Amino acid sequence: MPYMYVCIVVSITHAD
């Protein structure tokens, strides 16, 4: 499971 992708997705998701 690529943590990089997860980190990016989470960052975008948290981008209000």
Image (cartoon, grey):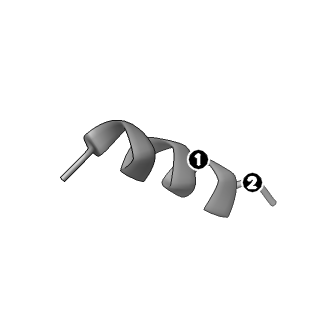
**Residue in the picture at 54% in, 55% down:** 9
- Assess whether mark 2 and mark 1 are in contact (beta carbons under 8 angstroms): yes
Q: Furthest residue to the top?
A: 4
Residue receiving disc 2: 15
Residue, disc 1: 11
Q: Is residue 9 above or below residue 7?
A: below
Between 4 and 15, which is closer to the camera in this rendering?
4
Q: Which residue shows up at 37% across the image and 36% down it?
A: 4
Q: Secondary structure at mark 1?
A: helix
Residue 6 visible in rendering: yes
Number of marks in the rendered image: 2
Q: Residue furthest left?
A: 1
Amino acid on which disc 1 is placed: Ser
Q: Nearer the viewer, residue 16 or 3?
A: 3
Q: Name which residue type carries label 2.
A: Ala
* C-alpha distance separating marks 1 and 2: 6 Å
Whether residue 14 is visible, yes or no, is no
**Residue 9, placed above or below residue 13:** above
Residue 3 sits above or below residue 6 on the image = above
Quadrant for the C terminus, please.
bottom right
Residue 8 in percent (x, y) is at: 53, 43
